[in-house]
Image (cartoon, rainbow, N blue to C red):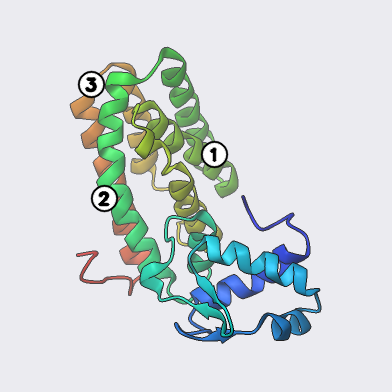
Amino acid sequence: MSTAGRGLHGRVLETLGPAITAGDYPPGSVLRTDELAQTFEVSRSVMREAVRVLESMHLVESRRRVGVIVRPSAEWNVYDPQVIRWRLAGADRPRQLRSLTVLRGAVEPIAAGLAARNATAEQCAALTECAIGMVAHSRGHKLEGYLHHDVAFHRLILDASGNEMFARLGDVVEEVLAGRTHHAVMFDDPDPAAVTLHVHVAEAIRERDAVRAEELTRQITAGALQELDILAPGGHSPAAG
């Protein structure tokens, strides 16, 4: 659930969460809830609720007689969609995008191959509709409309794989795709070759061609990495290759 619509503690989170993930509060920093409540002009109960959310993300931990301690980034729940969104909004965006895109490259091709074996007729039809929607929004700077169909397409593949672990990565993939769009890490119009690949993936899944579905999806994720090299350089790390 997004912090939007969570009221006062949601407003606190939208400031404090990005500050923690950006390193404004280094690991080991002690946050005093009373002081933060004064800073944000909210009650202590609102501040405690915000802290509970941050604890659920493993960004902080509360210690009696000490306060709220910022945890090391290695302990964060990096799969939490809100944590991803906050990290993508920070200066470390290129490296975060690359890390997430590498994850997509490891998961989505396999999921597409499984979807070719397991997808229902309804899922195949929905994939085709999404691909058609992507084509319809691929020209004329219609990136928000394109994003809507792109997210639905990749969620469908993960769901249609029949693997519940893959399906749970739908929120992660959505944040990657949305982050690329909202932070202008995409061309004004999507790469025509990538759009066509999505159409062919839908066809391969409908035709039960697992090998082709996997290979075409691998080309999509490889292309996404190549785009990052152009639009968000500086995100390389030993883990990313």
Instruction: Name the foreground residue: 27 vs 149.
Output: 27
Q: Single out the residue that lies furthest toward the front.
A: 65
Q: Which residue is mark 1?
A: 137
Looking at the rendered structure, the kind of residue marked 2 is Ala
Asked whether the residues under the numbered discs 3 and 2 touch, taking CB atoms below 8 Å apart as contact, a structural biologist would say: no
Which of the two discs, 3 and 1, labels the residue nearer the N terminus?
1
Is 92 on the left-hand or right-hand side of 205? right
Q: Residues within 10 Å of mark 1 (few under 14, many from 20)?
A: many
Q: Secondary structure at mark 1?
A: loop
Q: Secondary structure at mark 3?
A: loop
Looking at the rendered structure, the kind of residue marked 3 is Asp
Q: Which residue is mark 3?
A: 209
Q: Is residue 199 above or below residue 1?
A: above
Q: Position of residue 113 (x, y in %)?
A: 25, 29
Q: CA distance from mark 3 to mark 1?
A: 27 Å
Is 153 on the left-hand or right-hand side of 13? left
Q: Residues within 10 Å of mark 3 (few under 14, many from 20)?
A: some
Q: Name which residue lies at 33% across and 62% down.
A: 98
Q: Which residue is mark 2?
A: 222
Q: Name which residue lies at 38% across and 42% down.
A: 192
Is 86 on the left-hand or right-hand side of 240? right
The image quadrant of residue 99 is bottom left
Q: Position of residue 183 (x, y in %)?
A: 52, 63
Q: Secondary structure at mark 2?
A: helix
Looking at the rendered structure, the kind of residue marked 1 is His
Q: Name which residue lies at 34% across and 18% down.
A: 206
Q: Is residue 40 above or below residue 213?
A: below
